[in-house]
Amino acid sequence: MFQTEVYRIMSRKMTVTAMLGVLLLVLYYGVGITVWGEGVIDGGKVYAREEAIAMDKEIAAEFTGPLTDDIIRRIWDIYGAPLGEEARRGTYDVMEIRAEQGSQENFCNIFVTRRFAEKIQSEEGTISYVLPEDLSQNEFLQGDYYFCYAGNGWSMYWDIFVVAYILVCLVVAVALSPMFAEDYACGTADIILPTVCGRQRLWWVRTGVGCCFASVYYWLVCGSIFIEQTMFYGTEGLNISCAMVNIPFFFLKNMEPAWKGLIIVYLAGWFSILVLTVTVQCISAGSKQSFGALIRVLLAFLGPFAAMRILLDSLPMGKINAFLHYLCYSTPLCFPGTFAEAPDKDKLFLWGIALIMGVALGALGNHSYCRHQVKTASTTLR
């Protein structure tokens, strides 16, 4: 029975096409905004892509370690601010022009310029950067922050993960929406449900198949982007503090290494995928058509976030509104990032809400399908 249900999912051409399309799109997107956007100017020479990554690693090796005022000033004294920092990541020709103008551009001085330097615009419109004398109040000098080369690969990893995660959710919705609704549409529910293994056992088998499918595809896609970035950037960048590469983490502990933040994000994403799977099956069990089930699933997936941003954010933040925000943050679309950023006590609360919603939706879907009234010959004649 398990193999039969797996075959039902994988036999749909639209599902297989969506799975392959999303995997290829995510891998292409991951390389496109990271490796292909890398550029270094050093000693009047422009390095691009893999050469830029290698040069950046060589430059950053000297400054790797706990971030201090001394490291920041050493980077500034050696490399200064890049020319036209706002326009960085331009074409190779543009970078060659800046190289001729004497610009030095690498991961280290770009980081110092963006995080520590003050931007000054003259009356003529030219922009320059100045490193303040006192850096003691900067957030990155308030704790044990660790600096090392991260490049675009780890600096933009959260953006890549979000795109991959949302696309995986959509594929799961497309693949699993017909799971029960198809029985009603094709009339097979009237044949399956009266059988010995047609109700509870079939529900549990399909639930297991759905969770296994969603889990395997989630780790395939999200694991692939991790392997992809590791191939180009290595694993050294995972030691950089979360705050320096915008990986979600509780703000009072965001000096923790990036790999810790990614572990939390990945596990939270996996949990959310399982909750989404149960949600899809619940909606499918109550829908008579596969397409209608898919529309309802998409509304359930996107609706809470839209309601929070459009309605709840415009209302006064009282206890009821705060609780409604927690409910929205606990839904699959928002859960991974929100959970990673929450303090420990709120993590447990968010996880509890999500778990309760998942169990409740599972019970509701089970009741809806297993209590379905089978049409008999007599009722059909009437």
Image (cartoon, rainbow, N blue to C red):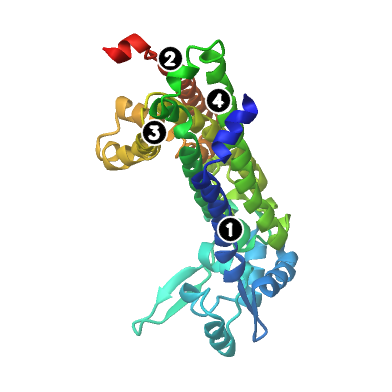
x, y percent for residue 213: 59, 35
Q: Residue at x 60, y 42 (%)?
A: 217
Q: Residue at x 53, y 14 (%)?
A: 200
Q: Nearer the viewer, residue 41 or 63?
A: 41
Q: What's under tag 1, amino acid-wise?
A: Ser
Q: Nearer the viewer, residue 230 or 200?
A: 200
Q: What's under tag 2, amino acid-wise?
A: His
The residue wearing badge 2 is: 367
Q: Is residue 249 above or below residue 73?
A: above
Sequence-wise, the earlier of marks 2 and 1 is 1
The residue wearing badge 4 is: 206
Task: Give the Cα separation between the discs numbered 3 and 2.
Answer: 25 Å
Q: What's under tag 3, amino acid-wise?
A: Cys
The residue wearing badge 3 is: 328
The image quarter in which residue 57 lies:
bottom right
Q: What's under tag 4, amino acid-wise?
A: Arg
Report the mark closest to the observer, 2 or 1: 2
Sequence-wise, the earlier of marks 3 and 1 is 1
Report the mark closest to the observer, 1 or 4: 4
Task: Give the Cα separation between the discs numbered 3 and 4.
Answer: 27 Å
Task: Give the Cα separation between the discs numbered 2 and 4.
Answer: 14 Å
Sequence-wise, the earlier of marks 1 and 4 is 1
The residue wearing badge 1 is: 155
Q: Is residue 139 visible?
A: no
What element does badge 3 sit on? helix
Which quarter of the rendering shows the N terminus? top right
